[in-house]
């Protein structure tokens, strides 16, 4: 990537972070830092297979309640056809590893490497969560069905890495919002909402 392209990305990222910081930082939920926790998760992955790679990571939105896990990371291995693993960061800071043995070959995807995303989970949440989403979270029954996901945008080789904020109320699963932002720049790529119309 050229120096000019990197400068452009840095400018866009800076503008996105300024916009997020200009909003109230008193959010109704918090998230664990994926950037800080990923080394421990990756170490558990390479203990399973030396060539294990991060395929997807889901960060729980935490309110005043208790969560069974804070981060769920899926790891694949290009040399493993029938098994993948889920590595979970638990609230006490420990890591659990859950293998998944499949009857069909594991679908291999492009690895999500650290150089493909600049925004940490906390910054991504501040950018992706708009006022409508804030009101939804404040009035929802809980955050068990909501998450912030780092993944590839589609299955096409070389697809960009994005953060996907999924807001869903477990008691009303048809109501919610999904926001996708570029994991490098913070640009909002799409936002789809399905909230009931406000009373006149």
Image (spheres, helix red, strand yellow):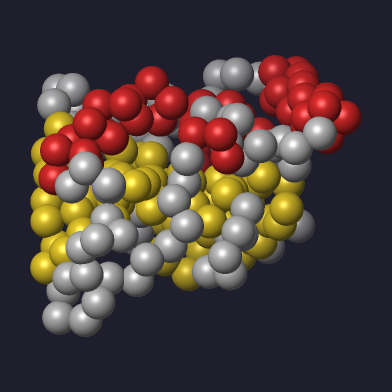
> For the C terminus, which image quadrant?
bottom right
- Residue 101: quarter of image: bottom left
Picture layout, residue 79 above or below residue 181: below
Report the residue at 31% width, 26% height from top. 39
Query: Residue 102: horizontal and vertical position, in percent?
Result: 16, 74
Position of residue 12 in the picture relative to residue 104 (left or right): right
> For the N terminus, which image quadrant?
top right
In depth, the one of 17 and 64 nearer the eye is: 17
Picture layout, residue 67 above or below residue 55: above
Picture layout, residue 195 above or below residue 6: below
Query: Residue 115: horizontal and vertical position, in percent?
Result: 56, 34
Circle count = 0
In depth, the one of 133 and 125 nearer the eye is: 125
Report the residue at 73% width, 53% height from top. 189
Say if residue 134 shows up in the picture: no
- Residue 73: quarter of image: top left
In depth, the one of 13 and 107 nearer the eye is: 107
Report the residue at 14% width, 45% height from top. 48
Say if residue 176 shows up in the picture: yes
Query: Residue 112: horizontal and vertical position, in percent?
Result: 47, 46
Report the residue at 27% width, 47% height from top. 52
- Residue 88: quarter of image: top left
Query: Residue 144: horizontal and vertical position, in percent?
Result: 31, 48
């Amino acid at each position: 990537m050229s120096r000019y392209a990197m400068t452009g990305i840095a400018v866009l990222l800076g503008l996105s972070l300024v916009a997020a910081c200009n909003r109230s930082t008193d959010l109704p939920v918090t998230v664990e830092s994926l950037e800080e926790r990923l080394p421990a998760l990756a170490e558990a992955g390479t203990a399973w297979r030396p060539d294990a790679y991060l395929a997807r990571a889901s960060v729980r939105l935490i309110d005043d309640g208790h969560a069974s896990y804070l981060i769920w990371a899926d790891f694949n291995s290009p040399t493993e056809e029938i098994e993948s693993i889920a590595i979970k960061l638990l609230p006490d800071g420990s890591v659990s590893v859950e293998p998944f043995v499949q009857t069909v070959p594991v679908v291999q995807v492009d690895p999500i490497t650290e150089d493909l995303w600049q925004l940490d989970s906390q910054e991504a949440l501040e950018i992706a969560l708009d006022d409508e989403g804030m009101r939804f979270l404040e009035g929802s029954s809980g955050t068990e069905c909501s998450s912030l996901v780092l993944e590839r945008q589609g299955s096409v080789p070389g697809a960009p890495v994005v953060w996907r904020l999924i807001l869903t109320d477990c008691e009303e699963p048809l109501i919610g919002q999904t926001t996708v932002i570029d994991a490098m720049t913070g640009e909002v790529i799409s936002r789809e909402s399905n909230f009931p119309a406000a009373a006149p």
